[in-house]
Image (cartoon, rainbow, N blue to C red):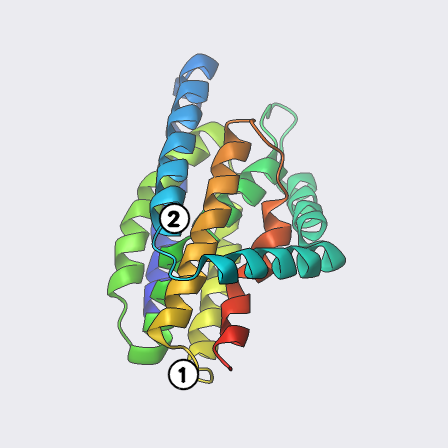
Amino acid sequence: MLGTIVNCVTIFIGCIVGLFIKGKITTKISNTIMNGLALCVLYIGISGALKGEDTIQMIICVAVGALIGEIIDIDKRLIKLGDYFEKKVKKKSDTVSVSEGFVTASLLFCIGAMAVVGSLESGLKGDNTTLLAKSVLDGISSLIFSSTLGIGVMLSVLSVLIYQGVITLAAGLLSGILSTVVISNMSAVGSLLIIGLGLNMLEVTKIKVANLLPAIFIPIIFGLF
């Protein structure tokens, strides 16, 4: 869990700095920064998705994952949680949605290949190298995101702790079926979802990325056969 804990700490510190400089950035600059970050998110997603080894499996994973996600309606539950936090911490003077910051940051920090692979490596080998590298990137991203999306980004620390923590702890139990191919396909599907998140950030689409999250774990089922 060391890698996950460090990851949460760097996000928290980045948010503190970002909130400190928040009022010093104009809306015009904030929008430009957000668009630039969205392009970076798209690049990360595309480069990761292209590393997938089985296109047909990716399609099946996304389709089945979408079905499961819609039945559970993860997106609605995540937004409700964000709205709950918003009622608790938002000030009347705030113009940015706490819920939006929480949901966007939670998805960005959790569905990437580094989050999945890093957590698996931590649980299977005790190797936190990937998560420590992710911590540096997330720290910088949280600084920029919190300066534009506000305190909601800081609340995403809870999502990262639970998500990566569960994967790390479960990795030991699933060590027998988590082959290199399975992990690679999980990463590729996760990267595909990041593309969706990037498009949403650019307001090109309104994809319910959260409802696609189960797709990341469907390759484990393929690993059983």
Residue at the (46%, 20%) spot, across then down? 31
Q: Reading the chain from its start, which is encountered first: label 2 or label 1?
A: 2
Q: How many marks can you see?
A: 2
Closer-to-camera residue (58/153) = 58
Residue at the (54%, 38%) spot, across then down? 101
Q: Helix, strand, or loop for circle 1?
A: loop
Residue at the (47%, 70%) spot, across then down? 167
Identify the residue position indicated by label 1 in the image: 175
Vertical position of residue 69 compared to residue 121: above or below: above
Identify the residue position indicated by label 2 in the image: 11
Closer-to-camera residue (109/208) = 208
> Which residue of the protein is positioned furthest toward the right in this rendering?
71
Residue 172 on image: x %, y %: 41, 83
Mark 2 is surrounded, within 10 Å at the Cα level, by few (under 14), some (14 to 19) or many (20 or more) other residues, namely many
Vertical position of residue 60 compared to residue 200: above or below: below
Q: Is residue 46 visible?
A: yes
Q: Position of 155 compared to 117: left or right?
A: right
